[in-house]
Image: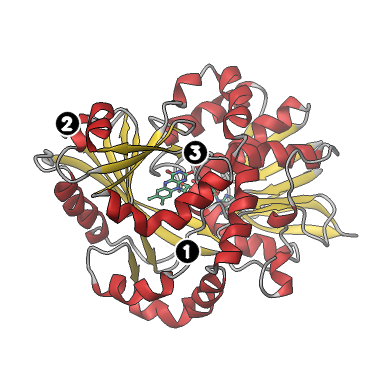
Amino acid sequence: MRIGIIGTGIVGVATAGWLQRDGHEVIFIDPREAGEACSFGNAGSISPSAVLPVAMPGMWKKVPKWLLDPDGPLVIRSHYLPRVLPWLMQFLRHSTEAEVTRIAGAMRGLLSPVFEAYEPLLQRAGAMSMVRRNGCLYVYSSRDMAQKWAWGANLRRDLGVEMQELEAEALFELEPDLRGSFGFGQYAPDNGSTPDPSALVKAIYAQAIRDGAEHLYDGVTGFDLSDSIVRALKLASGETLAVDGVVVAAGAWSAQLARMLGTRVPLESQRGYHVTVQDPGISLNRNVMAVEQNIMVNPMAMGLRLAGTVELAGLKEPPNYARAQSLLRVGETMFPGMRTASFTEWMGHRPCLPDSMPVIGRPQRVENAWLGFGHGHVGMCGGATTGRELANLISGRSPEIDLTPFSPERFRRGLAR
Ligand SMILES: Cc1cc2nc3c(=O)[nH]c(=O)nc-3n(C[C@H](O)[C@H](O)[C@H](O)COP(=O)(O)OP(=O)(O)OC[C@H]3O[C@@H](n4cnc5c(N)ncnc54)[C@H](O)[C@@H]3O)c2cc1C
């Protein structure tokens, strides 16, 4: 089949790689180069343990304090509040213990096979070095402080995630430069990361092109549909593109396309920022999640990347780099003595659904379209498995994981379950 893939982020390129293994012809449609949108500047964690949703029990109590703190982890631009409020209410409804337990279980299914889903793609691309399997650390100022997050950590353990507790000295043995602000850690040895998320995406993309994929630098604006079948894609240039099937992997921009295929999803952009510090004078060996600060720190090929924060302001507003500056300020308190003379800043649109789970599957009303988007904070973790599962569906095989929780139609029924 000739499959059009809308989007060349991690989800689009991984889907292409898996589809080509089944002998399908692939054509990417994206006005941008591969790996230049949200998949460009993320924190690069590639972790089967990243199963917890963003909305956690008791979070609603913390929101007012966060909103008052200019360096806090959440900002809502005031003009955007009325627009995003219904989404926020839905988001908070998923923060009960029962919901979080259900979501984490489903996400464990998606994220557990992360490395086996990447491996064939990276092997073929000669890019195995794009994934490092050297664990990650969750760090806290003290063991007492870690207690505040114990419920989530225990849920991870219940789902089979290995987490080794490290008192201060053991922590500093692994990562000497954590000395100063941190006094307790949890080491998750089965996790990993990439030294360059954009290069990872570009490597899989380049292999797909070598294997015969084409890339049309255009935007998709609609579909020619008849008898529940997409016959062609309508393009921003005014052209049309005939396809046998289509995958919507357009990240935070996917909702409108899904709606044209008859599926309404409450997709919101959780804008996130990074600073990548060149020559920081700090050396880490692996990904570190500073839990109290809500910042992920990853030693990358191009410098030490600090990434995080959530800003709700939609897809159109320009970035507010004060958010990136605040990451840098908090980073300086975490790593006293960090050199910050040279750094880059970036903002990306995380594609987020209120239950922190992606949609993976076919719109009910269309026979030859598939949706793969909404991976929120964990697209690098879940992208490759999503690609594998979409290829399974498109090629008529049974999925290898339970896709029921990721049904694109789950929002029709009110509380997504
Ligand atoms: C600060 C930050 C830190 C993060 N850290 C991590 C992390 O450590 N680990 C992790 O797993 N995830 C992380 N994420 C999340 C991760 O980056 C995303 O989930 C992931 O990149 C989404 O990939 P995607 O392929 O769905 O979308 P994108 O990479 O955004 O790609 C979508 C593509 O679709 C194209 N497109 C859009 N509309 C159209 C159209 N109409 N026609 C044609 N093309 C179109 C766009 O041009 C774009 O190229 C982080 C995100 C941020 C912001």
Q: Viewer-proximal residue, 64 or 388?
A: 64
Neighbours of disc 2 within 10 Å: few (<14), some (14-19), many (20+): some
Does label 3 point to a residue whose CB lies under 8 Å from ligand 1?
yes
Q: Is residue 137 above or below residue 155?
A: above
Q: Which residue is identified by label 1?
A: 56
Residue 205 visible here: yes
Neighbours of disc 1 within 10 Å: few (<14), some (14-19), many (20+): many
Label of residue 279 in the image: 2
Q: Which residue is identified by label 3?
A: 47
SS at badge 1: loop
Label 2 or label 1, whichever comes before in sequence order: 1
Q: From mark 2 to mark 1, how far is it between C-alphas? A: 36 Å
Among the 4 quarters of the image, the one containing residue 406: bottom right
Rendered residue at 73%/25% (across/down):
21
Query: What is the three-letter code of the residue carrying label 2?
Result: Asp
SS at badge 3: loop
Among the 4 quarters of the image, the one containing residue 211: top right
Query: What is the three-letter code of the residue carrying label 3?
Result: Ser
Q: From mark 3 to mark 2, how far is it between C-alphas? A: 26 Å
Query: What is the three-letter code of the residue carrying label 1?
Result: Met
Label 3 or label 2, whichever comes before in sequence order: 3
For the residues labelled 3 and 2, say whether their Cβ atoms are less than 8 Å apart.
no
Image-based side of 188 in relation to 29, left or right: left
Image-based side of 152 in relation to 244, left or right: left
Residue 31 visible here: no
Image-based side of 49 in relation to 316, left or right: right
Rendered residue at 39%/32% (across/down):
196
